[in-house]
Amino acid sequence: MLPRRRRGHGRRRVVRGVGIGVGVILLLSCVGVAAAHSGGLRGTGRNPISVPTWLFLLTGGGVVGVSFLLASFVTDRRLVAAVHDWGRPLPTPGRIVRAVAGVGAVVLLGVTVAVGYVGPSTGVRNLAVLIVWVGWWGGFVASTYLLGNSWPTLNPFRVLAERVPSLNRPYPERLGSWPSVVGLLVLVWVEVATPLADDPRLLATVLVAYAVVTVGGSAVVGTNRWFGSVDPLARAFRFYGWLAPVGVENGRLRVRLPGGALPDTVLDGRDDVAFVVTLLFVTTYDGFVATGPWAAGVRATVDAGVPALGVYVGAYLGGAALFYLAYRAAARLGRRRAETYLSATYLACRFAPSLLPIAAGYHLAHNIGSVLVLGPTLSAVAAAPLSPPASPPQLAALPAWFGGVELAFVLLGHLLAVWVAHATAYDLFPSRLQAVRSQYGVTAVMVGYTMLSLWIVAEPYVAPPFIAS
């Protein structure tokens, strides 16, 4: 059952978290003039598609809506249970393997930081930039939802933190996991609002700062509590791992169907719901700021006398709040339509994991092109990190049809999200009609997310305007 939390404390946590987030973002914004960019490295952006925009948006939204109808009226409880109960045990790696992997991750982090400082200053010629954005952000992050979450073993920050004595100070329970929500917003803001993908020195400095904060924080409240409630990366990868076909059950590895663990997942409260919604939002915002309409809108607003920084911050915080409020409204609608005694908060906690496939599908669509194009670059630069080729090799331009593959990843993520929500509803409600009605709100939100994600992926890449402090 969902643990009860006093509403007053919940509101204070939200206000405190937003206040901290705004303060940190504004401090980070005072670094001078920074180039905004999307998560992918420049020059590896999207290609436009030849299908009219209105047609594929309506088609994508319609596919999600039809899939909801099919899942609701064609499937039954026996089929849903058979799909989500299927699984097979896997051999579990021994302690020696995990220890060696952890040491290797720390060594790789050290190499990344060192090359970031002493290597070439050009982005795609510096191994640190390629390791972080191509190998880690594009490739490894995708592995956490396509294969399984190996970050607890390969997390170099946790390996370092476990070697530092802990003070084991009590963690303020009133904070819950709101610090991880604020941390995720700050991390993505730094990535979007600074030239982190182009400046190896800045990237190395951010890695060092993150290591210091992480090790220091875990030394105060304990490793398990820090990485369980505060660290945004550990929490994001853990949530993505619920979606993966390989997971841990009762201390052992087990293979299951993708998303099989999500219908049984119950989040702890509003803070966890906010983290899932924020994870979806920041992935969307990362691509949205690299579209032509955004660039045109920012320039028009700046010409009208509004600082670009205000536009970016307002859209960022306002968009995060809008995503969260839309999902909360969907949960309330589902409660009314299902006519259930369950609270809207509890329904939000149960259905929120169904949003994870959407975030994963969009992340894959947004980054797969960069991984394919710059994969040869990473290999060539890794062979001589201090003296890489003047023009490292890249994969030739992706074919025009590859844009359809990216759109397919977005749609597949949304279709899986509909199925997970359907299975969750069947697990919650004994009545078939009640289960169907409980999904009205979340399905409407998914249709909206689908159309927005498809539009962003289909838009050609446009370098965003500069942010002036």
Image: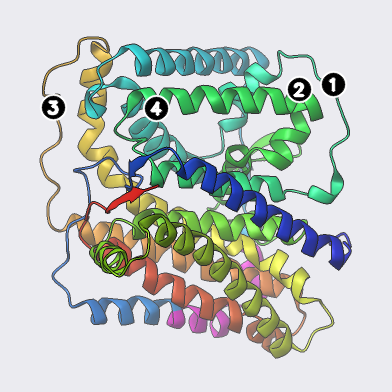
Quickly name the residue at label 1. 167
In the rendered structure, which amino acid carries the disc numbered 2? Ala
Marks 1 and 2, Cα distance to the nearest angstrom?
Answer: 6 Å
Q: Is residue 152 magenta?
A: no
The stretch of residues the image draws in magenta is 65-83
What is the secondary structure assignment of the residue under circle 2?
Answer: helix
The disc, 1 or 2, on the residue closer to the chain's N-terminal end is 1
In the rendered structure, which amino acid carries the disc numbered 3? Pro
The disc, 4 or 1, on the residue closer to the chain's N-terminal end is 1
Marks 2 and 4, Cα distance to the nearest angstrom?
Answer: 26 Å
Marks 4 and 1, Cα distance to the nearest angstrom?
Answer: 31 Å
Badge 4 density bin: few <14, some 14–19, many ≥20, Cα 10 Å: some
Closer to the camera, 412 or 23?
23
Quickly name the residue at label 3. 393
In the rendered structure, which amino acid carries the disc numbered 4? Leu
Image position, residue 399 (x, y; %): 12, 51
Closer to the camera, 243 or 309?
309
At a point 20% along the width and 19% down the height, the residue shown is 380
